[in-house]
Amino acid sequence: MYEGIVQDLIDELGRLPGIGPKSAQRIAFHILQTESFDVTKLAETLLAVRDKVKFCEICGNVSEQDRCSICRDPRRNQSLICVVEEAKDVVAIERTREFRGLYHVLGGAISPIDGIGPDDLRIRQLMQRLADGTVEEVIIATDPNLEGEATATYLSRLLKTLEIKVSRLASGLPVGGDLEYADEVTLGRAFEGRRVVVG
Amino acid sequence: MPVYRDEAVVLRTHKLGEADRIVTMLSRRHGKIRAVAKGVRRTASKFGSRLEPFMVADVQLYEGRSLDVIQQAETLGAYGADIAADYASYTAANAMVETADRLTEAEGSLQQFLLLVGALRSLARREHAPGLTLDSYLLRSLSIAGWAPSFGQCSRCGAPGPHGRVVVQLGGVVCDDCAPAGTAQLDASTLGLLGALLAGDWPSAEASDDRTRAKASGIVSAYLQWHLERGLRSLTHVSREVPPAS
């Protein structure tokens, strides 16, 4: 235990996800001992991020304005919506530069064991977005794990009532992996989603 | 015994650090195991989907100081994908694994393991309506845990049945003499369904109508919540609709 404010700093850092007591102590001493470390800038950024950043009123992505830069961009394909679990997934898909449509962030996946049901996600807002008939295709890009698949199942069933094309991101073998290490479900999916090369 | 091997069904997972997960499993021989699966969240992980909830796997682990570490996993029963493809089955399976997690808090048992694996397999194969499979599992897992309900003789004085009043606090049906004042009478078809679910009499259970199933589910939920003391989070999300036949 350290005295007073140093221990307070270690305790506060230790509350952040992924930072244990040892890491918190190391960061605290880096802040204390490194003269070039700009504490004011870090403190100002932390305050600013809490004050200025909010969730886009349309898609739920993080934004400094009421609408995020993607929803404000008129060059994006307005007839295409990609449904993701978290704002982090938007960044991952944007990095591919393959998708030029809009997004809808659900805010998680259906996980009854964690007490998260459909009403806890932004599914109602998605249905409202689809009501005006502008959107022609919804791409479900939830995580390829059990909760993500179950959420995709739920959404597909819900969207079946609307006359909109619904697609799901392909899943299969990862690039750079060895076939022999692929599990049965992944390999099965790769066979299901195989593509014709010749003929 | 630094390294050991067992068959286990995955109950739930929690994210840990950058790409790891803590996996809670109910095993055949070692009871409930909490272990770390390193790098499992990376797309190129060697574990792939083998350590997703509802999967049954042959796992090799080594003992850690607080948590064990999973070294290898081979699939024995890949039920997760089939269960997730039907929302009612998914919600039912969640309630099952949460119940198994709670009932094996102190120690696991081979019977609980086999019952859970059988119930998940049945859900994945769409053998029965998910709601019936769930209610049957709940009654039978409580019985294995030592809280077997009685739907025949009076659960208080043992007077032979049939009796029509159910008091979950007393362990099932009670005779008119033992029933507290104001206990409602339950119809014979609901009591018949509850008995069939407990005994695994599927032809009788499947012959029941939706109204009877809803009443029986209410009794099963109340009985479960009474014995577990704390409510199940997943039970409120269970979808009771009937899936299309496979």
Image (cartoon, coloured by chain):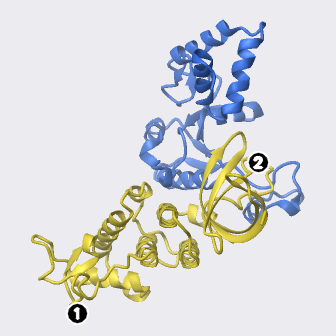
Horizontal side of residue B74 vs B131, given as left or right: right
Q: What secondary structure is marked by label 1? A: loop
Q: How many marks?
A: 2
- Residue density around tag 2, few if under 14, some if 14–19, many if 20 or more, within 10 Å: some
Tell me which chain the residue with mark 1 is part of. B
Tell me which chain the residue with mark 2 is part of. B
* Residue A74 in sight in this render: no
B81 or B28: nearer the viewer: B28
- Spot occupied by residue A78 in the image (x, y as percentages of width and height): 58, 31
- The answer to whether tags 1 and 2 share a subunit is yes
Q: Colour of chain B?
A: yellow
Q: Colour of chain A?
A: blue
- Spot occupied by residue B171 in the image (x, y as percentages of width and height): 29, 76
- Asked which quadrant contains residue B57, the reply is bottom right
Q: Residue at x 71, y 8 (%)?
A: A38
Identify the amino acid type marked 2. Gly
* Location of mark 1 (residue): B160
Q: Is residue A158 above or below residue B221?
A: above
- Spot occupied by residue A173 in the image (x, y as percentages of width and height): 81, 55
Q: What secondary structure is marked by label 2? A: loop
- Asked which quadrant contains residue A187, the reply is bottom right
Q: Is residue B33 above or below residue A69?
A: below
- Spot occupied by residue A128 in the image (x, y as percentages of width and height): 43, 37
State the mark number for residue B39: 2
A85 or A116: nearer the viewer: A116
State the mark number for residue B94: none
Identify the amino acid type marked 1. Pro
Q: Residue at x 53, y 31 (%)?
A: A59
